[in-house]
Amino acid sequence: MGTLTQDMMRLCGEINALRGSRETLMKGLARDTRETKVQVSDMRAGFRKVHGRMAALSKAERTKFVTNMAADVSGMLHQYENAHRSMANKTKQENVKFVTDLATDVSGLLNGFQADLQEQASETHRANRAFVNNVVQEVSGLLGGFHHARKNMALTSARDRDQFVSALKKSVKNLRHEVASDLAGARQAWSGLSPAARKAKEEAERKAKLAEEQKRRAEAELRAREESERKARAQVELRAKEEAEKAKPESTKRKSKEDS
């Protein structure tokens, strides 16, 4: 017998052995499955019985708990209603008493406030009338002083301005004559280049500078005069304000004396 034949015979034997083992395994699995189904069916039946007993017991307990709770809540609601009714009656009585007392107190306060207000209004009216009369008198006096001082200052300023303008006109007139003569000399100087012409030119330039200096001096005097007049007006106004400030404490003292 060759090697191939032996190998094939051995392979066939192994296949047959494996087939038998598989049939034995399948039969064991079928048997185990049937036994497991029976055990599971018995276990489910036991679960249903236990669950039924537990459901009945739990239902009875819940029913008892709900019944007891309803009784307790009913008692609590009854007690709450009684307490609420008693508290509402007490609160109503207290509120009525509080409102009555408050109305009485407010009425008394309003009457006292009205009397004090009328008395204060009368005193304020008298004090204001006296204060206004004093202010009118003081202002009238101040206005008279202002008018007199302003009139005097206006007269003084008018005389000073007239004198200054007259002097300024004379200065300007002299300057105009000097400038005209200088211009004539300048025209003559430019007409020739002789030493005499150069001298006349230099003299004309000197006179022109002198005239310009006098003009600037006159303008400076004019500005100084205006500044002095402004300062004088400021001093007059300051003195008037000081007199008004001095008169104000006296009126305040008189008012305080009248109030006291």
Image (tube, rainbow, N blue to C red):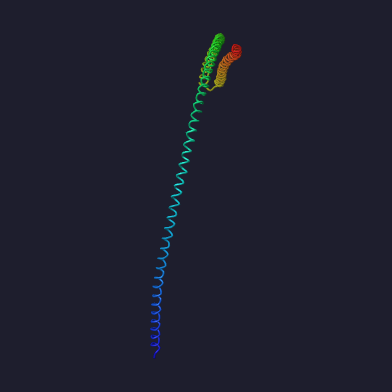
**Which quadrant holds residue 116?**
top right
Q: Is residue 161 above or below residue 2?
A: above
Q: Which of 225 and 77 is in front in this view?
A: 77
Q: Where does the image place residue 255, in percent across and percent down from the top left?
A: 59, 12
Q: Is residue 80 above or below residue 159?
A: below
Q: Which of 260 and 138 is in front in this view?
A: 260
Residue 246 visible in rendering: no
Q: Where does the image place residue 118, in percent across and percent down from the top left?
A: 52, 14
**Which quadrant holds residue 201?**
top right
Report whether 119 appears left or right of 3: right
Q: Is residue 51 above or below residue 161?
A: below
Q: Where does the image place residue 151, in percent across and percent down from the top left?
A: 55, 9
> How many marks are shown on the rendered structure?
0
Residue 100 visible in rendering: yes
Quadrant where the N terminus sits is: bottom left
Quadrant where the C terminus sits is: top right
Q: Which of 37 and 57 is in front in this view?
A: 57
Q: Where does the image place residue 36, in percent across and percent down from the top left?
A: 41, 69
Q: Which residue lies furthest to the bottom in this view?
A: 1
